[in-house]
């Protein structure tokens, strides 16, 4: 079946998410999602500009369009890459719908029969975080992530006592381990909160809790600093959710900056970019853990990718909603889309249906208006800015 020319490229800000719909002359519609969540306004503007290039062109020439959008002007960046990612996901969705095949089958086919997931715990207090972990365990998850032992309460200034912060966070990690037992893997996520020396100290402190990984202990600005942390701690570091460049991921691999890579399909170039990253990681015998704190559209894209790459460790499954205080055991945002599989026993079946197998629901636009994410930083006691 021959592809039709593209006739519409439309960015759609809905709730805190940014989608794109791409329609061809034969009436097929593909959907994608951007991953620069804090800057969807700028990403939408980039999608509009890219849309002017895409209208009238063959929707099947996905790699050609990716290459043109990425190389034009010799500029990229998180906003540009998020726009390219959303467009790429939508074009692969279109291709799958046109061929009546799921996207993962177009990426080489499934390498597994089901996909292991980790749910996201959340809590502003130690007790709330423990209860969230227990709820996820009782719902069947065999791995729990987004466990921030320094807590998510951005309204409370960060303590000036290093000893107190380390003692409380370490105690909380072991309290969670005792509560859920050793049949559940813990994914510790510090959200870039620590300096390298602090991150090394904390990595040693939580060793005996046997975390599956220790995510983003420091800011990702310096690959060398992340490599120093990984070399010094006895637990595996995972990072990459803010990284969008293939070369930066290569440097992470070469430097030993991470045991696991955390690329985001909405930021690293969609399926086209992520397949390249997965192959790069495999060359270094490094597994990938797709980052995903977005809507079910991005979740379905991550599941298709996870089905097709052999070096997958586990897939993130958004059961909480960042900045909204939503804490669940099920996928958030189900009402935004048409259909979704459910996790069972910590795993999820391979996606079915053509393309992504999901589209935006009729009520998504009307009932969920755009919610801009305004600029705000967590504060230290001295008034300086601290990572969330």
Image (cartoon, rainbow, N blue to C red):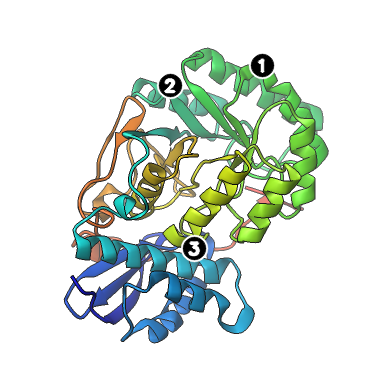
Q: Visible in this render: residue 252?
A: yes
Dot 3 or dot 2: first in sequence order is 2
Residue 337 in percent (x, y) is at 25, 54
Q: Which residue is drawn at 61% across and 20% down?
A: 210
Q: Which residue is drawn at 54% across and 35% down?
A: 124
Q: How crowded is mark 1: few (under 14 residues within 10 Å), some or many (20 or more)?
A: few
**Marks 3/2: CA–CA distance:** 35 Å
Q: Quadrant of residue 341?
A: top left
In this rendered view, identify the residue nearer to me: 329 or 196: 196
Where is 127 relative to 321, above or below? above
Q: Visible in this render: residue 382?
A: no
- Please name the residue that numbered disc 2 is placed on: 134
Q: Residues within 10 Å of mark 2 (few under 14, many from 20)?
A: some
In this rendered view, identify the residue nearer to me: 256 or 42: 256
Q: How crowded is mark 3: few (under 14 residues within 10 Å), some or many (20 or more)?
A: many
Residue 104 in percent (x, y) is at 33, 50
- As drawn, the label of residue 59 is none
- Please name the residue that numbered disc 3 is placed on: 269
Residue 33 in percent (x, y) is at 39, 62
Q: In which quarter of the image is the N terminus?
A: bottom left
Q: Quadrant of residue 170?
A: top right
Dot 2 or dot 1: first in sequence order is 2
**Marks 2/1: CA–CA distance:** 20 Å
Where is 64 relative to 153, above or below? below
Q: In which quarter of the image is residue 167?
A: top right
- Please name the residue that numbered disc 1 is placed on: 208
- Nearer mark to the viewer, of 3 and 2: 3
**Marks 1/3: CA–CA distance:** 37 Å
Residue 314 in percent (x, y) is at 46, 35
Mark 2 near mark 1, Cβ–Cβ under 8 Å? no
Look at the numbered disc 2 and give the secondary structure of its residue: helix
Where is 225 relative to 272, above or below? above
């Amino acid at each position: 079946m021959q592809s039709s020319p593209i006739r519409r490229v439309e960015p759609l800000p809905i709730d805190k998410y940014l989608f794109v719909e791409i329609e061809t002359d034969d009436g097929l519609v593909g959907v994608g999602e951007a991953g620069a969540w804090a800057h969807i306004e700028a990403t939408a503007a980039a999608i509009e500009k890219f849309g002017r290039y895409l209208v009238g062109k063959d929707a099947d020439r996905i790699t050609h369009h990716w290459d043109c959008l990425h190389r034009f002007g010799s500029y990229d960046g998180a906003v540009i890459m998020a726009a390219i990612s959303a467009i790429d996901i939508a074009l692969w969705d279109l291709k799958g719908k046109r061929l009546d095949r799921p996207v993962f089958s177009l990426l080489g086919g499934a390498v597994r029969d089901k996909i292991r997931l980790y749910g996201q715990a959340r809590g502003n207090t130690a007790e709330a975080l423990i209860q969230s972990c227990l709820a996820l365990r009782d719902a069947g998850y065999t791995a729990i992530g987004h466990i921030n032992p320094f807590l998510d309460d951005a309204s409370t200034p960060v303590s000036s006592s290093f000893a107190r912060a380390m003692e409380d966070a370490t105690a909380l990690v072991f309290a969670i381990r005792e509560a859920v037992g050793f049949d559940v893997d813990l994914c510790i996520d510090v959200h870039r909160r620590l300096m390298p020396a602090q991150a090394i100290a904390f990595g040693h402190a939580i060793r005996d809790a046997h975390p599956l990984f220790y995510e983003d202990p420091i800011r990702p600005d310096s690959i060398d600093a992340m490599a120093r942390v990984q070399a010094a701690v006895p637990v595996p570091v995972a990072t990459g959710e803010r990284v969008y460049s293939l070369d930066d991921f290569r440097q992470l691999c070469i430097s030993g900056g991470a045991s696991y890579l955390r690329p985001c399909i909405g930021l690293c170039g969609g399926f086209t970019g992520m397949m390249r990253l997965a192959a790069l990681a495999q060359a270094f015998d490094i597994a990938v853990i797709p980052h995903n704190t977005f809507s079910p559209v991005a979740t379905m894209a991550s599941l298709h990718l996870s089905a097709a790459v052999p070096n997958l460790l586990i897939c993130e499954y958004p059961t909480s909603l960042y900045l909204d205080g939503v804490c669940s055991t099920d996928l958030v945002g189900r009402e935004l889309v048409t259909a979704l599989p459910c996790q069972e026993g910590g795993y999820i079946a391979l996606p079915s249906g053509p393309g992504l197998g999901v589209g935006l629901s009729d009520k998504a636009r009307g009932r969920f208006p755009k919610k801009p994410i305004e600029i705000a930083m967590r504060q230290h006691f001295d008034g300086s800015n601290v990572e969330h």
